[in-house]
Amino acid sequence: MTATPDFCRQIETLRPALLKYARLQLRNPAWAEDAVSETLLAALEKPQAFAGASQLKTWLVGILKHKLVDQIRKNSREMSTTATSDDGEDLDELLFAGDGHWREAQHDWGNPEDVLRQVDFMKVLEACVEKLPGQQGRLFMMREWLELESDEICKELAITPTNLWVMLHRARLRLRDCLQAGWFTAAPNGGAS
């Protein structure tokens, strides 16, 4: 079965959201583009696999997650210990002058400790999200991480908009409590308390 033109258009309109998600996960625009392209190709090659049991975006994100893992595996194997550019030039000669200083001024990379705290915070946040009761956790992920619209979530979970907002409020309160207990009170090196 081939993809219909309407199916192709729907998938193409979701490309920017998928790319945003992939960039957040991979932190590398080229790898993110590859993962999204492979996701869309997989969806277009087997459109019959989309049974309509979920939203198209949710289905595509499911495929994308596997492609992201593939990208991480692929690129970790391709990383080389030799410092050469794509055209074979020695990167040291391209980046550094004869006196050992950078040829071009480098931008500020920030404080590595702050980056580490941010990574640690994300781990605590993910653990807190996993502790949310089933439906609360699911709708929080749909709304905040997959960025689905409220009406899509209500339709998917067969709930009213009022029920959605109450459950999101409760999920946020639980997350706040969990983060206060697991992060803010135990944050290293002067974190908020």
Image (cartoon, helix red, strand yellow):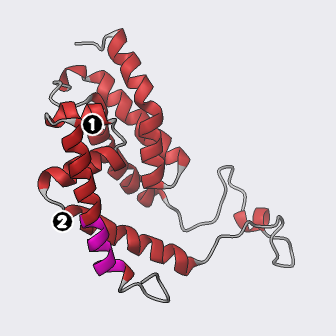
Three-letter residue code for mark 1: Thr
Counting the numbered discs, the total is 2
Q: Quadrant of residue 183?
A: bottom left
Q: Mark 1 to mark 2: distance in Å? A: 21 Å
Q: For mark 1, give the secondary structure.
A: helix
Quarter residue 179 falls in: bottom left
Q: Main secondary structure of the magenta part?
A: helix
Query: Is the N terminus in the top left, top right, bottom left or bottom right quadrant?
Result: top left
Badge number at residue 130 = none
- Percent across and percent down for residue 18 are 41, 38
Q: Position of residue 30 (x, y in %)?
A: 54, 45
Give, as a single range, the part of the protein colored magenta: 174-183
Residue 13: give x, y in percent of width and height.
43, 25
Q: Say whether residue 77 is left or right of residue 57.
A: right
Which residue is denoted by mark 2 in the rendering? Answer: 131
Q: Is 59 part of what is drawn in magenta?
A: no
What residue is shown at x 38% (from left), y 67% (from top)?
A: 122
Which residue was labeled with disc 1?
58
Taking the spot 80% from the left edge, 71% from the top edge, the residue there is: 102
Q: Is residue 66 above or below residue 81?
A: above
Circle 2 crowding by C-alpha within 10 Å: few under 14, some 14–19, many from 20? some
Label 1 packing within 10 angstroms: few (<14), some (14-19), many (20+): some
